Image: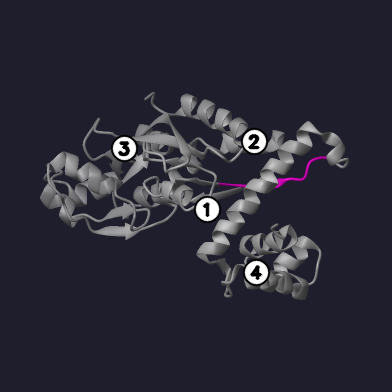
Amino acid sequence: MLDYASLSALAAVVREGSFERAARALSVTPSAVSQRIRLLEDRVGCALVIRGQPCTATEMGRRLCQHVDRVLILEQELQGALPALAPDGPVRVSLPIAVNADSLATWIVSAIAAYASESPVLMAVAVDDQDHTAEWLQRGKVLAAVTGSARAPVGCNSRPLGSMRYRAAASPSFMARHFNAGVGAGSLARAPNLAFNTKDELQSRWAHRLCHRHVELPSHGLPSPQAFVAATVAGMGWGLHPEALVAPYLNEGSLVELIPESPLDVPLYWQQARAASLLLDGLTRRVVAAAEAALIAA
């Protein structure tokens, strides 16, 4: 049998990032947390926690944390069906998901907030590029994800949400400075663009579609959708922006499209672990409804 007191200590250390904060969360001493994890490591025969700032899980530690998350969710469901098991009400459980930053900045927060208000959960939202959120699900770090991949990892389901429309835009002064002679491979190779991070390939995809070949783009890194828009308005560079964020700026003229009416539509999918539990069904309904209202139909 697994020692769930030790497993809970392990999950708390990984979630909180330190033995001290984990001890406060569990209402025990740091030495008790350390002892529980040491006993668990002795039993499984390998290290489970990489001690650092913050503490992180080893591969085996991650798998055990994933198991704990699923057991807690299943227990929460059982308490809902048998209230006598939890006379003080169901205990809130952590529900980890991964979302791309642009969805988080535009349409999905309302779905997450509505679900959290009606369910005994504590949402743990990780942010990554839509082409990489599925990796979080595949590694077991989350139970569901908004992703740009139609193909779900083994043991997961996938359903289309619709497409997010992006507009390639820049300020009028930036356009005059860098694209006075037109937008093409040469001017795009010289004009700085904005990228969310090194994983962000939206600008390259748009440029490739326009020029029919790869263009090496000089990029500023700016990991915030809202700052992305503000920096573009300020003339820092051009970029691909969710239409919902830049529509007001395009309407008032503080931003203009590089090529009028040349959007890039990015399909999004909702993927979830099949074995996660029925608790995810409520979140799925909320996410799908919000996507139907905000995204372009698949």
Q: Residues within 10 Å of mark 2 (few under 14, many from 20)?
A: some
Residues shaded magenta = 89-96
Q: Which mark's residue is nearer the viewer, 3 or 1? A: 1
Q: Earlier in the sequence, mark 4 or mark 2?
A: 4
Q: How crowded is mark 1: few (under 14 residues within 10 Å), some or many (20 or more)?
A: some
The quadrant where residue 279 appears: top right
Q: Is mark 4 on a helix, strand or loop?
A: helix
Q: Which residue is painted at 70% across and 57% down in the image?
A: 1
Q: Is mark 2 on a helix, strand or loop?
A: helix
> What label does residue 279 carry, if any?
2
Q: How many marks?
A: 4
Q: How crowded is mark 4: few (under 14 residues within 10 Å), some or many (20 or more)?
A: few
Q: Position of residue 256 (x, y in %)?
A: 29, 38
Kind of residue indicated by mark 4: Arg
- Spatial separation of the CA atoms under disc 1 and disc 2: 17 Å
Q: Which residue is painted at 23% across and 32% down in the image?
A: 260
Q: In this view, does 27 lie to the left or right of 232?
A: right
Q: Is residue 186 left or right of residue 74?
A: left
Q: Dot 1 corresponds to which residue?
A: 141
Kind of residue indicated by mark 3: Arg
> What label does residue 43 carry, if any?
4
Q: Which of marks 4 and 1 is nearer the N terminus?
A: 4
95 in magenta: yes
Q: How crowded is mark 3: few (under 14 residues within 10 Å), some or many (20 or more)?
A: many
Residue 176 vs 246, above or below: the answer is: below
Kind of residue indicated by mark 2: Leu
**Does any portion of residue 54 appear in the rendered image?**
no
Q: Dot 3 corresponds to which residue?
A: 167
80 in magenta: no
